Amino acid sequence: MGMFYSRNLLSGKRKYLFGVILLLFVFVMCLTFNIAGGDSFGIARREVLLRKIGDELLTQSGDSRSRVLPIKKIAENEYQISFENELTFQPDSLVNTTRRLLANDPLASDYVVNVLNCSNSSVVYGYAISNNKRDDIIACKGRVQPRGCYMVNIKFKPTGMVAAKKGYLLGSLSFLAFVGFVFWGSVKPRKAEPGKQNTGILTFGSAVFNAQERQLVINKNTVDLTATEARLLLIFALSPNQTIERSRLQKEIWEDEGVIVGRSLDMFISKLRKKLEPDPSINIVVIRGKGYKLEINA
């Protein structure tokens, strides 16, 4: 009866745990897709602006026919503009063009621009733009660069909004893991400690065992048990037809209380056998080299 109630309780807790984790999982997934959706739109819009920068650079170079090649995302928050043909550029025009067009990107307040030589990827010109203009780093604005094959790399500073969303996502995942750990620890079956758990009424064979009152009833005859006998029988009754190692019995019954046991275990097992004799279907048998087992023959 007590074992049946315990199983139902654990089953109910597991269902509750599953529901909580499912809700949290849905929440985290929604947050993830929201971040991904927001980023994908922002990336698409930013790439259009970058193509516009490339287009104006070609126009300023006197080229109105060749193409701006597809924008490449070369790293997190870093993009590359490349061109079909060679071009020349004026640094001050490049600075003004990027500043004017990227002002339309609300997430591009801080960025670094490097113009690279296609042949060896060396930096021929670079500058940094900041939301606070006093922090801008711009040099050599008046020097026209010779015609050549150039690539323009623009690296954006991660925005607080994106960082915050990612922080929420990581926090949600951590919270989900923590909740799962706490609830799983609360519902997973634990090793029974005599006198602390399952102190209700247990039945096996025709025997009814009241662990709290330390009473064993077989065929309507009540037998009182000592505290040690009751603790031993509780361990067996919670794991019927399963081998209980001798070392476990010694530890849980005696060693945990600081008492070293010798042949006392065999003596108490013998006493328990005698008190279980009225029901021939119940017996405590020796498993050689291992321990004991409460054997119940239905």
Image (spheres, helix red, strand yellow):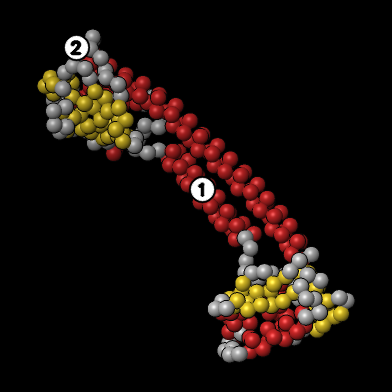
Image coords of residue 190 (percent x, y):
62, 66
Closer to us: 137 or 63:
63
Q: Which residue is mark 1?
A: 173
Q: Residue at x 53, y 52 (%)?
A: 177
Return the residue nearer the eye: 5 or 62.
Answer: 5
Residue 141 at x, y percent in the picture: 18, 27
The residue depicted at 57 percent of the width and 43 percent of the height is 25
Please state, as top left, top right, bottom left or bottom right, where the C terminus lies in the image. Answer: bottom right
* Residue that numbered label 2 is attached to: 62
N-term-proximal mark, 2 vs 1 = 2
Q: The residue under label 2 is which amino acid type?
A: Gly
Q: Is residue 253 above or below residue 107?
A: below
User: Quick one: which residue is furthest to the right in this view?
Assistant: 220
User: Based on the displayed image, in which of its 4 quarters is residue 26 positioned?
Assistant: top right
Q: Residues within 10 Å of mark 1 (few under 14, many from 20)?
A: some
Q: Which residue is situated farthest in the left direction here? A: 146
Residue at (77, 79) in percent of width and height: 276
Q: Going by the image, does 152 lie left or right of 215?
A: left
